[in-house]
Image (cartoon, rainbow, N blue to C red):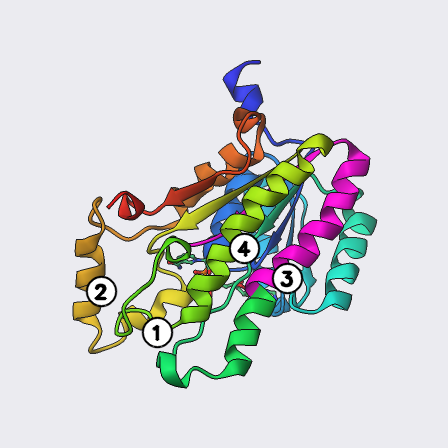
Amino acid sequence: MQLQEMFNLKGKVALVTGGGRGIGKHMATGLAEAGADVVLASRNLNNLEEAAAELSATYGIRAIPIACDVSKEEKIAALVDDTLAKMGRIDILVNNAGVTWGAPTLEFPLEQWDKIFNTNVRGVWMLSQRVARTMKEQGGGVIINVSSIMGFRGSEEEWHPSVPYNSAKAAINLLTMNLAVKLAPHKIRVNAVAPGFFRTDMMAFVEKPGMENVHKMMVRAIPLKRSAGVDDMKGVAVFLSSDASAYVTGQILGVDGGLLAK
Ligand code: NAP
């Protein structure tokens, strides 16, 4: 197969959770540029409508927004039904939607633990299971989960006070590996990306006055000495979604400027 053909996603349908902003939008942009039609799903319809209009105008693909809270089982079922009704199939699922919350470890509230796990782990499981049923019927597909470098390590209280976030992302790493093994007989590949420091809303706290030192220290800790943006994730999303990675499954790919290598 020629390289250009390998990376081409024309005729594919991608469902991207949290696709209206941040890393989800970066990934949806890559997939759209490679020719895929995209469904963007999250709670806030305004973001999604704007992003979908931008992607279809820029890349000439079909992009539709669907409101969905991935922590709710009935909303997940409706999202899959709605996507299939509007697009007819799902070839690529990007489980990107995620939340975090910070509080001192000894006072961390249980309801925030539940919110993080319900969105970042339970949501990924529920949507993957449903979409995998469709992919099995279709003869195959690709699932990409968005983990984090935090899923590989603990972090000091002053840097990142969120035990459930790191724990949830560690769960995603194993969910990725285990689903890759379980779904391989159905020709469904499952991989994850582990971002380092992307300047999105989730990381907006480092832009606040008084946080300049934290920001500088974070960049200094990254071997490539910079934070990341859209061009750092677009190509990775296309690689993992396309035939270029046909023999890659069960992997967690650090997109982190070298942080995991330290
Ligand atoms: P972000 O800008 O805060 O975006 C989070 C996305 O998740 C939004 O699109 C949000 O949309 C969606 N979302 C949150 N809760 C949801 C729910 N219950 N149902 C559906 N959608 C929901 O953060 P980001 O940095 O792009 O993060 C994206 C992913 O990358 C997350 O999984 C995060 O853990 C991971 N990550 C980020 C970094 C980083 O440096 N930024 C590093 C490592 C990992 P709505 O608000 O419209 O629902």
- The first of marks 3 and 2 along the sequence is 3
The residue labelled by disc 1 is 161
In the image, farthest residue toward the top: 1
Q: Is residue 141 magenta?
A: yes
Q: Which mark is residue 123?
A: 3
The residue labelled by disc 2 is 215
Q: Is mark 3 within 8 Å of ligand 1?
A: yes
- The first of marks 1 and 4 along the sequence is 4
- Label the magenta part by its dominant secondary structure: helix
Depth-wise, is mark 3 or mark 4 nearer the camera?
3
Q: Which residues are magenta?
A: 120-148
Q: Could you tell me how far apart the alpha carbons at marks 1 and 3 are, in whole angstroms? A: 22 Å
- The first of marks 1 and 3 along the sequence is 3
**Local SS, label 3:** helix
The residue labelled by disc 4 is 96
Rendered image quadrant of residue 6? top right
